[in-house]
Amino acid sequence: YRMGKLSMSEMIIETAEKFRTQSTHPIIIIDDASDVVIEGDRERLAQVLMNVIGNAIKFSPMGGNVTISLKNDSKNLHVSVKDEGIGIPTEDIPKLFSKFQRIDNSSRRKIGGTGLGLAICQEIIGKHDGRIWIESQEGLGTSVHFELPLLSETTEYVYPEGAEGNPPVMIVEDDI
Ligand code: ATP
Ligand code: MG
C-alpha cells in the first residue's frame, strides 16, 4: 500500500466523472465533508469507489439516481452510495463480502460480474482501519456505507528540556 494524504471528496468527483460518460443514471454528490483528509492508497480506494458506484449503476437496470453522501465526525469519514435499484434480500447481505458470491435469481442473471468486487472492497477498507457495510431493501434499493479514520490534526506541543512549566511551542502542520 502506498499511503498518502487524500481528499475523498475529490476522488469521488473524479470517479463520478468517469461514470458520467457511460451511464444513464444521474449521480448526485452530497458533500458535507469536503475539507477533511484521510490517509490512504489512492489507487486502491479508487478501486473501491469504482466497484461500489459501478454496482449501484449495474444493479439499477430500471435507472434511478445514484446518491453519494459524505459526512464526518471528529474521528471518521463516512461515505454512502445509495441506489434505487433491485436491492438485495436481507438474508443474502452477509454473504456478499465473500469471494465469488453473487445472487442468482431471474432479475440478476443477465447482469455480469465475477462476485469479487465487494470482497476486494472489504479487504482494502480493512487495510485502512475502516469498515464497510450494506443496507438494502429488495425492490427498493441499496446503500453501501464505508467509514475511514480521518487523518488526525497534527498538532504537537514541544516542551524544551527543563521548560515544562512555560507556554508550549505549538507546531501545526497544515500543508495539505
Ligand atoms: P465484480 O464486482 O467482481 O465485477 P459483482 O459486481 O457481481 O462482480 P460484487 O461487487 O462483489 O460482485 O457484488 C456481489 C453481489 O452483490 C452482486 O453480484 C449482486 O448480486 C450484489 N450487489 C452488490 N451491489 C449491489 C447493489 N448496489 N444492488 C443490488 N445488488 C448488489
Ligand atoms: Mg461489483
Image (cartoon, helix red, strand yellow):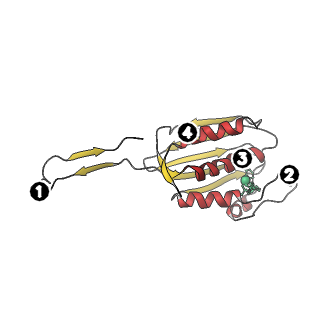
At label 2, the amino acid type is Ser
Marks 1 and 2: CB-CB under 8 Å? no
Query: Residue 68, percent across and down?
Result: 62, 41
Rounded to the nearest angstrom, the CA distance separating label 1 from label 4 is: 45 Å
* Residue at image point 71% right, 35% down: 20
Name the residue furthest front.
2
At label 3, the amino acid type is Gly
Q: Tag 2: Cα neighbours inside 10 Å, few (<14), some, or many (≥20)?
A: few
Left or right of residue 120: residue 151: left
Mark before the other along the chain sequence, 1 or 4:
4
Mark before the other along the chain sequence, 4 or 2:
4
SS of the residue under disc 1: loop
User: In the rendered image, which residue does mark 3 sit on?
Assistant: 54
Marks 4 and 2: CB-CB under 8 Å? no
At label 1, the amino acid type is Gly
- Kindly tell me whether mark 3's CB lies below 8 Å from ligand 2: yes
SS of the residue under disc 4: helix
Rounded to the nearest angstrom, the CA distance separating label 3 from label 4 is: 18 Å
* Residue at image point 75% right, 46% down: 140
At label 4, the amino acid type is Glu
Query: Residue 30, percent across and down?
Result: 58, 36
Q: Nearer the viewer, residue 116 or 93?
A: 116
Q: Quadrant of residue 28?
A: top right
- Kindly tell me whether mark 2's CB lies below 8 Å from ligand 1: no
User: In the rendered image, which residue does mark 4 sit on?
Assistant: 10
Query: Residue 3, percent across and down?
Result: 49, 54
* Residue 162 tag number: 1
